[in-house]
Protein backbone atom coordinates (compact mmCIF):
# COMPACT_ATOMS: atom_id res chain seq x y z
CA UNK A 1 0.00 0.00 0.00
CA UNK A 2 1.28 3.46 -0.86
CA UNK A 3 1.93 5.96 1.92
CA UNK A 4 -0.84 8.59 2.07
CA UNK A 5 1.39 11.49 1.02
CA UNK A 6 0.48 11.24 -2.66
CA UNK A 7 -2.59 10.88 -4.77
CA UNK A 8 -1.48 8.98 -7.84
CA UNK A 9 -2.58 10.42 -11.17
CA UNK A 10 -2.87 7.96 -14.05
CA UNK A 11 -0.71 5.36 -12.28
CA UNK A 12 -1.47 1.70 -12.71
CA UNK A 13 1.56 -0.52 -12.23
CA UNK A 14 -0.06 -3.34 -14.17
CA UNK A 15 -0.88 -1.26 -17.23
CA UNK A 16 0.95 2.09 -17.36
CA UNK A 17 -0.21 4.63 -19.92
CA UNK A 18 2.39 4.94 -22.66
CA UNK A 19 3.43 8.33 -24.03
CA UNK A 20 2.26 10.52 -21.14
CA UNK A 21 3.99 11.71 -18.00
CA UNK A 22 2.55 9.86 -15.03
CA UNK A 23 2.76 12.03 -11.95
CA UNK A 24 2.11 12.16 -8.24
CA UNK A 25 -0.09 14.79 -6.69
CA UNK A 26 1.29 15.83 -3.29
CA UNK A 27 -1.32 15.87 -0.56
CA UNK A 28 -0.87 19.08 1.45
CA UNK A 29 -3.21 21.98 2.23
CA UNK A 30 -2.44 24.40 -0.60
CA UNK A 31 -4.51 27.58 -0.90
CA UNK A 32 -7.02 27.78 -3.76
CA UNK A 33 -5.40 28.37 -7.13
CA UNK A 34 -2.01 26.78 -6.32
CA UNK A 35 -1.04 23.45 -7.87
CA UNK A 36 1.88 21.06 -7.36
CA UNK A 37 2.92 17.82 -9.06
CA UNK A 38 5.90 15.47 -9.20
CA UNK A 39 6.60 13.34 -12.26
CA UNK A 40 7.54 9.66 -12.10
CA UNK A 41 9.29 7.29 -14.48
CA UNK A 42 6.05 5.44 -15.20
CA UNK A 43 4.29 5.23 -18.55
CA UNK A 44 6.97 6.85 -20.67
CA UNK A 45 7.65 5.91 -24.31
CA UNK A 46 11.28 4.87 -23.86
CA UNK A 47 10.78 1.64 -21.95
CA UNK A 48 12.57 1.03 -18.68
CA UNK A 49 14.82 4.07 -19.00
CA UNK A 50 11.82 6.39 -18.93
CA UNK A 51 11.20 9.64 -20.71
CA UNK A 52 14.19 11.95 -20.29
CA UNK A 53 13.92 15.39 -18.73
CA UNK A 54 17.69 15.73 -18.39
CA UNK A 55 20.46 15.31 -20.97
CA UNK A 56 22.37 12.08 -20.35
CA UNK A 57 24.89 13.04 -23.02
CA UNK A 58 25.77 16.01 -25.23
CA UNK A 59 24.56 14.56 -28.52
CA UNK A 60 22.15 16.60 -30.64
CA UNK A 61 19.69 13.71 -30.56
CA UNK A 62 19.62 13.64 -26.77
CA UNK A 63 19.40 17.42 -26.49
CA UNK A 64 16.46 17.58 -28.88
CA UNK A 65 14.75 14.73 -27.09
CA UNK A 66 15.05 16.50 -23.76
CA UNK A 67 13.66 19.75 -25.20
CA UNK A 68 10.73 17.90 -26.70
CA UNK A 69 9.99 16.05 -23.49
CA UNK A 70 10.03 19.24 -21.47
CA UNK A 71 7.59 20.84 -23.89
CA UNK A 72 5.37 17.76 -23.66
CA UNK A 73 5.27 18.03 -19.87
CA UNK A 74 4.25 21.71 -19.97
CA UNK A 75 1.57 20.91 -22.54
CA UNK A 76 0.19 17.99 -20.54
CA UNK A 77 -0.15 20.25 -17.50
CA UNK A 78 -1.62 23.08 -19.61
CA UNK A 79 1.00 25.54 -18.36
CA UNK A 80 0.75 28.90 -20.12
CA UNK A 81 4.35 29.97 -19.50
CA UNK A 82 7.62 28.14 -20.30
CA UNK A 83 9.28 26.26 -17.47
CA UNK A 84 12.50 27.68 -15.99
CA UNK A 85 14.72 24.58 -16.23
CA UNK A 86 17.62 25.37 -13.92
CA UNK A 87 21.26 24.33 -14.26
CA UNK A 88 21.49 22.83 -10.78
CA UNK A 89 24.86 22.90 -9.05
CA UNK A 90 24.18 21.74 -5.46
CA UNK A 91 24.47 25.36 -4.38
CA UNK A 92 22.26 27.95 -2.69
CA UNK A 93 21.46 30.43 -5.46
CA UNK A 94 17.77 31.28 -5.84
CA UNK A 95 16.34 32.93 -8.96
CA UNK A 96 13.01 34.40 -9.95
CA UNK A 97 11.31 31.90 -12.27
CA UNK A 98 10.06 34.52 -14.75
CA UNK A 99 13.46 36.24 -14.87
CA UNK A 100 15.15 32.88 -15.53
CA UNK A 101 12.94 32.44 -18.59
CA UNK A 102 13.88 35.86 -19.96
CA UNK A 103 17.59 35.47 -19.17
CA UNK A 104 18.74 31.85 -19.65
CA UNK A 105 22.28 32.82 -18.61
CA UNK A 106 20.91 33.33 -15.09
CA UNK A 107 19.61 29.78 -14.68
CA UNK A 108 22.59 28.44 -12.75
CA UNK A 109 20.71 27.99 -9.49
CA UNK A 110 19.20 25.38 -7.20
CA UNK A 111 15.93 27.05 -6.33
CA UNK A 112 13.40 29.35 -7.91
CA UNK A 113 10.54 31.55 -6.71
CA UNK A 114 7.41 32.69 -8.54
CA UNK A 115 4.77 35.33 -7.83
CA UNK A 116 3.40 35.40 -11.38
CA UNK A 117 0.20 33.46 -12.14
CA UNK A 118 0.90 30.82 -14.76
CA UNK A 119 4.66 30.81 -14.14
CA UNK A 120 5.67 27.53 -12.51
CA UNK A 121 8.76 26.73 -10.50
CA UNK A 122 10.48 23.45 -11.34
CA UNK A 123 13.50 21.51 -10.10
CA UNK A 124 14.83 18.04 -10.97
CA UNK A 125 15.98 15.28 -8.64
CA UNK A 126 16.98 11.61 -8.59
CA UNK A 127 17.78 10.98 -4.89
CA UNK A 128 18.25 14.58 -3.73
CA UNK A 129 15.33 16.11 -1.87
CA UNK A 130 12.84 18.32 -3.75
CA UNK A 131 11.23 20.89 -1.45
CA UNK A 132 8.11 22.78 -2.54
CA UNK A 133 6.98 25.86 -0.61
CA UNK A 134 3.92 28.11 -0.62
CA UNK A 135 2.64 30.94 1.57
CA UNK A 136 -0.83 30.96 3.09
CA UNK A 137 -2.54 33.29 0.64
CA UNK A 138 -0.99 31.65 -2.42
CA UNK A 139 0.79 34.77 -3.62
CA UNK A 140 4.28 33.25 -3.75
CA UNK A 141 5.58 29.73 -4.39
CA UNK A 142 9.04 28.18 -4.58
CA UNK A 143 10.90 24.97 -5.36
CA UNK A 144 14.33 24.01 -4.01
CA UNK A 145 16.83 21.28 -4.91
CA UNK A 146 18.12 20.09 -1.54
CA UNK A 147 20.71 17.36 -1.63
CA UNK A 148 23.03 17.12 1.35
CA UNK A 149 25.40 19.73 -0.09
CA UNK A 150 22.60 22.20 -0.66
CA UNK A 151 21.09 21.53 2.75
CA UNK A 152 24.31 22.05 4.66
CA UNK A 153 25.11 25.17 2.61
CA UNK A 154 21.73 26.74 3.37
CA UNK A 155 19.61 26.49 0.20
CA UNK A 156 16.38 26.28 2.19
CA UNK A 157 17.19 29.43 4.15
CA UNK A 158 18.00 31.33 0.97
CA UNK A 159 14.76 30.16 -0.61
CA UNK A 160 12.64 31.26 2.36
CA UNK A 161 14.33 34.66 2.32
CA UNK A 162 13.73 35.01 -1.42
CA UNK A 163 10.02 34.36 -0.92
CA UNK A 164 9.89 37.61 1.03
CA UNK A 165 7.13 36.64 3.46
CA UNK A 166 6.93 35.68 7.13
CA UNK A 167 8.30 32.16 7.51
CA UNK A 168 5.38 31.27 9.79
CA UNK A 169 3.07 31.84 6.82
CA UNK A 170 4.90 29.24 4.70
CA UNK A 171 4.15 25.55 4.38
CA UNK A 172 6.57 23.04 2.84
CA UNK A 173 6.32 19.73 1.07
CA UNK A 174 9.18 17.20 1.00
CA UNK A 175 9.07 15.21 -2.24
CA UNK A 176 10.58 11.80 -3.03
CA UNK A 177 14.23 11.40 -1.99
CA UNK A 178 16.57 8.63 -0.97
CA UNK A 179 15.68 7.22 2.44
CA UNK A 180 18.06 6.93 5.37
CA UNK A 181 18.50 3.17 5.08
CA UNK A 182 19.98 3.57 1.59
CA UNK A 183 21.89 6.84 1.96
CA UNK A 184 25.36 6.00 3.26
CA UNK A 185 27.78 8.93 3.65
CA UNK A 186 31.25 9.49 5.04
CA UNK A 187 32.01 10.97 8.43
CA UNK A 188 32.93 14.28 6.77
CA UNK A 189 29.29 14.77 5.77
CA UNK A 190 28.09 14.20 9.32
CA UNK A 191 30.79 16.50 10.71
CA UNK A 192 29.85 19.28 8.30
CA UNK A 193 26.23 19.21 9.43
CA UNK A 194 27.18 19.11 13.10
CA UNK A 195 29.48 22.12 12.75
CA UNK A 196 26.60 24.15 11.35
CA UNK A 197 24.03 23.03 13.95
CA UNK A 198 23.29 25.33 16.87
CA UNK A 199 21.77 24.77 20.32
CA UNK A 200 19.12 22.07 20.51
CA UNK A 201 19.58 21.38 16.80
CA UNK A 202 22.98 19.84 17.57
CA UNK A 203 21.49 16.75 19.21
CA UNK A 204 18.66 16.54 16.67
CA UNK A 205 21.14 16.69 13.81
CA UNK A 206 23.41 14.07 15.35
CA UNK A 207 20.41 11.74 15.61
CA UNK A 208 20.00 11.97 11.82
CA UNK A 209 23.16 9.87 11.33
CA UNK A 210 23.17 6.16 12.14
CA UNK A 211 26.62 4.49 12.16
CA UNK A 212 27.16 1.90 9.45
CA UNK A 213 27.74 -1.61 10.77
CA UNK A 214 29.65 -2.59 7.65
CA UNK A 215 31.88 0.43 6.96
CA UNK A 216 33.62 2.11 9.88
CA UNK A 217 33.53 5.90 9.63
CA UNK A 218 30.36 5.86 7.54
CA UNK A 219 26.79 6.75 8.46
CA UNK A 220 23.27 6.49 7.11
CA UNK A 221 21.90 10.01 6.77
CA UNK A 222 18.26 11.09 7.02
CA UNK A 223 17.78 13.84 4.40
CA UNK A 224 14.12 14.24 5.28
CA UNK A 225 14.76 14.87 8.96
CA UNK A 226 17.73 17.15 8.27
CA UNK A 227 15.44 19.28 6.11
CA UNK A 228 12.73 19.32 8.77
CA UNK A 229 15.21 20.51 11.39
CA UNK A 230 16.38 23.33 9.14
CA UNK A 231 12.87 24.38 8.18
CA UNK A 232 11.79 24.47 11.81
CA UNK A 233 14.83 26.60 12.59
CA UNK A 234 13.78 29.03 9.88
CA UNK A 235 10.27 29.27 11.32
CA UNK A 236 8.56 26.97 8.80
CA UNK A 237 6.69 24.50 11.00
CA UNK A 238 4.00 23.10 8.69
CA UNK A 239 5.91 20.41 6.82
CA UNK A 240 4.36 17.59 4.81
CA UNK A 241 5.57 14.62 2.78
CA UNK A 242 8.81 12.73 3.25
CA UNK A 243 7.30 9.26 2.84
CA UNK A 244 9.06 7.75 -0.17
CA UNK A 245 12.43 6.31 -1.11
CA UNK A 246 13.74 6.91 -4.62
CA UNK A 247 16.35 4.17 -4.21
CA UNK A 248 13.94 1.45 -3.08
CA UNK A 249 10.98 2.28 -5.33
CA UNK A 250 12.43 1.10 -8.64
CA UNK A 251 9.08 1.20 -10.43
CA UNK A 252 8.28 4.86 -9.96
CA UNK A 253 11.48 6.75 -9.26
CA UNK A 254 14.88 7.38 -10.78
CA UNK A 255 17.85 6.99 -8.44
CA UNK A 256 21.34 8.23 -9.18
CA UNK A 257 22.83 6.11 -6.42
CA UNK A 258 21.07 2.99 -7.69
CA UNK A 259 21.61 3.49 -11.43
CA UNK A 260 24.39 6.02 -11.97
CA UNK A 261 23.51 7.56 -15.31
CA UNK A 262 19.76 8.04 -15.03
CA UNK A 263 16.75 10.25 -15.67
CA UNK A 264 15.19 12.77 -13.32
CA UNK A 265 11.85 13.45 -11.69
CA UNK A 266 10.51 16.98 -12.01
CA UNK A 267 8.83 18.70 -9.06
CA UNK A 268 6.63 21.67 -9.95
CA UNK A 269 4.53 24.24 -8.13
CA UNK A 270 2.64 27.14 -9.63
CA UNK A 271 -0.09 29.73 -9.15
CA UNK A 272 -2.84 29.15 -11.68
CA UNK A 273 -3.41 31.88 -14.25
Image (cartoon, rainbow, N blue to C red):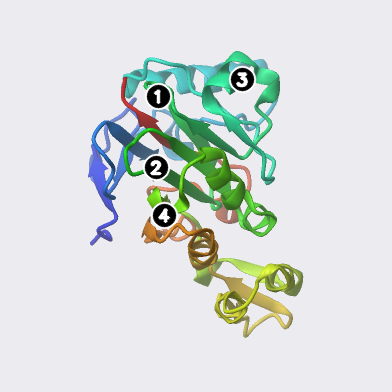
Compute the Cα span from label 3 to label 4. 41 Å
> Tag 3's secondary structure?
helix
| Residue of label 3 | 63
Position in image of residue 5 (x %, y %): 29, 55
Query: For the residues carrying marks 3 and 2, which lies nearer the camera in this image?
Result: 2
**Residue found at the very far front of the displayed protein:** 166
First-in-chain label (1 vs 3): 3
Q: Is residue 208 left or right of residue 117?
A: right
The residue singled out by tag 1 in the image is 73
Local packing at callout 3 (Cα closer than 10 Å; few below 14, some 14-19, many 20+) is some
* Marked residue nearer the N-terminal end (1 or 4): 1
Q: Is residue 191 left or right of residue 66?
A: right
State the residue at coordinates (36%, 17%).
75
Q: Which residue is mark 2?
A: 134
Task: For label 4, count other residues whose C-alpha is less than 10 Å away and answer few (under 14), some (14-19) or many (20+).
Answer: some
The outermost residue toward the right is: 188
Whether residue 266 is visible, yes or no, is no
Amino acid sequence: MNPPAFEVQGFDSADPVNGEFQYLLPQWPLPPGVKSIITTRVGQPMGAAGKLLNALDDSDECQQQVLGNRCDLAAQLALVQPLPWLVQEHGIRVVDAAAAIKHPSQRNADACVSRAPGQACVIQTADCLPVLLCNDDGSVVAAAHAGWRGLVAGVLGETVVAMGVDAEAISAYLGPAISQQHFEVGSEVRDTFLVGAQGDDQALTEACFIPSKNRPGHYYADLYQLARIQLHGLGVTRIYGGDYCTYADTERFYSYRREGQTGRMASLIWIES
